[in-house]
Image (cartoon, coloured by chain):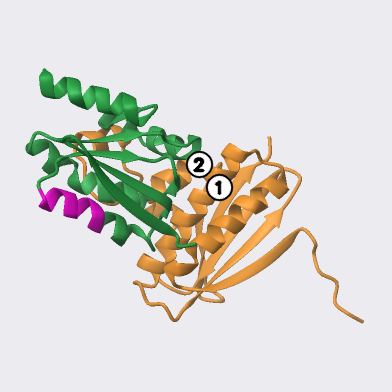
Chain colours: A green, B orange
Amino acid sequence: MADLSISVRQVGDVAVLLPAGFINAHTVRDFEDALEKLVTDGRYTILLNCKDLNYISSAGLGAIMGLIETVREHGGDILLSDLQDNVFAIFDTLGFTQLYRVFTDENQAMVAAASERKG
Amino acid sequence: MAAKIDHAQFKLVIPSQTRYLNLVTGLAKRASLVAGLDDAAAAKVSIAVDEAVTNVILHAYGGEGEHSVELELRFTEQALEIHIWHSGLGIRSDQMVLPDPKEYIKHPRKGGLGLLLMSRFMDEVQFKADEVSGRNECCLIKKIS
């Protein structure tokens, strides 16, 4: 099995990115490429569904951090859902749960994204 | 007569290539469980080792893949110790500057988080230089509670 595979689907205005496996210094380029392609395509509201993400190192956090200002400047955001306990611990330890909105599951994230569009 | 080995420690040497990160983090997680840590603590040790070995590969060796990284795991009743040896550029513990997470959130940027994760997830993180061998060491210690 590859260390990391990434799939993307569009749900309304939200691009849902599902990384499966490990995001570390070896795989981060693929993760960055996937995120950057979404931004290049003008898809600024991005949900990272992390249900199959086994871990993310600081390399992966840096990739997210590198794009957060760009997407927010365009009225979008990067949302997180379905974090496994150890992945949540990484985000929480570094205070990233204050910087990103974290949802229990994808449905909750979609409801929040939809209510913002109405708002 | 065959030399006796210490059954409470062993070594692994890998090439300085990120393709082996998953191998060493998997080993670190399993070793943590063997040492008596729970799943959550084992995951944290795994991440800390990822960050430490990544630092060696990318920063100490500048991304050059033809060097070696030596990991030594020591099991004691009190702790799991992971010693990571290399011959690249070293840092000392007094040179270790940790970013302030609150400031980091106010002013997001890439980089600087690996050392913070290591220090938060391990009980001790030490950087040492061995002047005799010319090698540098990063020592990660997780206490068994």
Please name the residue shown 38% across and 56% down the image.
Answer: A5
x and y, in percent, of residue A57 in the image: 40, 50
In the drawing, does residue A53 fall left or right of residue B14? left
Q: Residue furthest top?
A: A119
Which residue is located at x 32 percent, y 35 percent? Answer: A80
Q: Which residue is mark 2?
A: B121
Residues packed near mark 1 inside 10 Å, few (<14), some (14 to 19) or many (20 plus): many
**For residue A28, above or below residue B117:** below
In terms of image quadrants, where is residue B55?
bottom left
> In the image, residue A61 lies at what x, y percent?
32, 46
Towards the viewer: B95 or A74:
A74
Is residue A38 a member of the stretch shown in magenta?
yes
Q: Please identify the residue farthest to the left as the structure is shown.
A: A74
Amino acid type, mark 2: Phe
The residue under the point 19% across, 38% down is B107
Number of marks in the rendered image: 2
Q: Is residue B131 left or right of residue B96?
A: right
Identified at 39% across, 32% down, the residue is A92
Chain for mark 2? B
* Residues shaded magenta: A33-41
User: Residue A70 falls in which quadrant of the image?
Assistant: top left
State yes or no: discs 1 and 2 in contact (Cβ < 8 Å). Answer: yes
Q: Nearer the viewer, residue B48 or B139?
A: B48
Residue topped by disc 1: B45
Which secondary structure lies at badge 1?
helix
Of residues B124 and B14, the one nearer the viewer is B14
Q: Chain of mark 1?
A: B
Task: Decide: few, some or many residues near mark 2? Use Cα within 10 Å; few <14, some 14-19, many ≥20.
Answer: many
Instruction: Decide which of tag 1 and tag 2 comes sooner along the chain.
Output: 1
Q: Amino acid at mark 1?
A: Val
